[in-house]
Amino acid sequence: MNNTQTLKNQLQNLQNKTVALVYIFEGEEKPRSKHFFIWKNDIISCWSNATSKLKCIPFLVDTSSFVDKAINHKLPDVDYVVDINSGTWDLSLMALVPSVCSDIAVPCIPSSAVTIVTGESKLLSNHIARSLGLNVPRDLPKEDKTGVFRPINYGNSMDVTIGWNDKYKDGLYQELISGVEISTPLLYDPISRQLAALPTTMLIPSTKDPDWITSESCKKVGYVYKNIRLSESCINQFILLAQTIGVKSYCRIDARIKCADIDKLCANEDICISENDVYFLEINVMPTIRSGNSFGYSYDSIAASDTLYPYLSELTEILGEKPDVHTFVLAASLLANSKPDTE
C-alpha cells in the first residue's frame, strides 16, 4: 500500500471522531482563567474549521465547563482534546487541561501535563538542553548589565529585558548571543511516524542590530522573516530535545545564530548553519499557530526538499486542495495521538 493510500485510510478512520476544542472564556473571574493572553474568536474558528475539514466533529467548550463536566462525569464522549489555552500566569495551571485529559483517558493535543511543566519552564528546558549537548548561553550574575532576562514560564516575549528585570526575584539571566533569533517548528510526520522539522525562520530586525532580541519593547522596531538552513545534526539535536521532554504532536524551538553581520548572513543563500553556531533559548510546547506568524511562515515555506513535503503533498491530494496551517498541523497531531483502531 502506498503512502497516500495509507494516509487516506488513517484520515478516514478519524472521520466522525469528536474533537473538543478547549479555550479560555474571556472575562471569567476564576483564578484559573487569569491569563495574560487569550485566544480571540478568529483563532478558535481556525481550529474549528480545520476539525470540520478533516470530517471530525468539533466540540467547543471553555476550560471551566470542560473541567467541571469531566470531574462530574457529565462531559459528552470526546475522542481527542485540543488545548488552545495560552498565556497563563501560573505554570501549574497551564497543565490543568491535559491533567484532566489524563484522568479521563483522552489524548490531549499538543502536550501532556508533564511535557508542559517541563518544557514551558525555561530553567528546566535549558538544563535538559545543556545535558543533551546543545549550546546554551552561559548564566550571568544579576550585577552584569549586559545579559538577557527571561521569566521562568511566561511566553509572548513578556517581560524579557536587557539587564536583570527587578520585578522578579527569580528568572533566567544569560549572556546575550550577538546574532539573530531563529524559530524552528517541529511536527509529527505521519509518513515517517516521527518528529520532523519545518523550515527554520530568522527574525530579522529592521535595524539589522545583532544585539536585537524579541522582547516586548524591541518588537516595536519591526522585523521580517527569512528562512535559513540548519545542519542535519542541529535539527537532530532539536528533535532529541523535544522527544526527551515528551513532545508527540508539535512544538517550536527558539534559538540564536551567533554572527556579527546579519546582512552578510542573509546574503549567503547557500549557507548551512552548524550546531556550533546555534544557541538554544527555549522550547514552546504550546506555540501560537496562525497564518502570518513564524509558525505560519515556516509552513508556507515548505519546499520539495523538506522532510515534511511528502506529507503535505499527500494531504493536499487527499483533501483536493492545499490545507491551511491549522488543518496541516491538526491532521498530523490527531494521527500522532491515534488510538489503536485509527492506526
Image: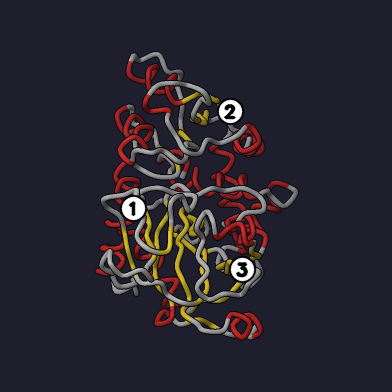
- Tell me which label, 1 or 3, sits earlier in the chain: 1
Q: Which of 267 and 322 is in front in this view?
A: 267
- Position of residue 334 relative to residue 27, above or below, is below
Count of numbered tags: 3
Mark 1–mark 2 Cα distance, whole angstroms, equals 48 Å
How does the figure colour the protein chain or chains?
secondary structure
The image position of residue 304, as x and y in percent, is 66, 70
Q: To which residue does mark 1 refer?
A: 166
Category of crowding for the residue at label 1, using alpha-carbon neighbours closer than 10 angstroms: few (below 14), some (14–19), many (at least 20)? few
Residue drawn at point x = 45 percent, y = 35 percent: 35
- Kind of element beneath mark 3: strand
Three-letter code for the amino acid on which mark 1 is drawn: Asp
The image position of residue 308, as x and y in percent, is 57, 63
- Kind of element beneath mark 2: strand
Three-letter code for the amino acid on which mark 3 is drawn: Pro
- Tell me which label, 1 or 2, sits earlier in the chain: 2
Mark 2–mark 3 Cα distance, whole angstroms, equals 42 Å
Mark 1–mark 3 Cα distance, whole angstroms, equals 26 Å
Q: In which quarter of the image is the N terminus?
A: bottom right
Q: To which residue does mark 2 refer?
A: 57
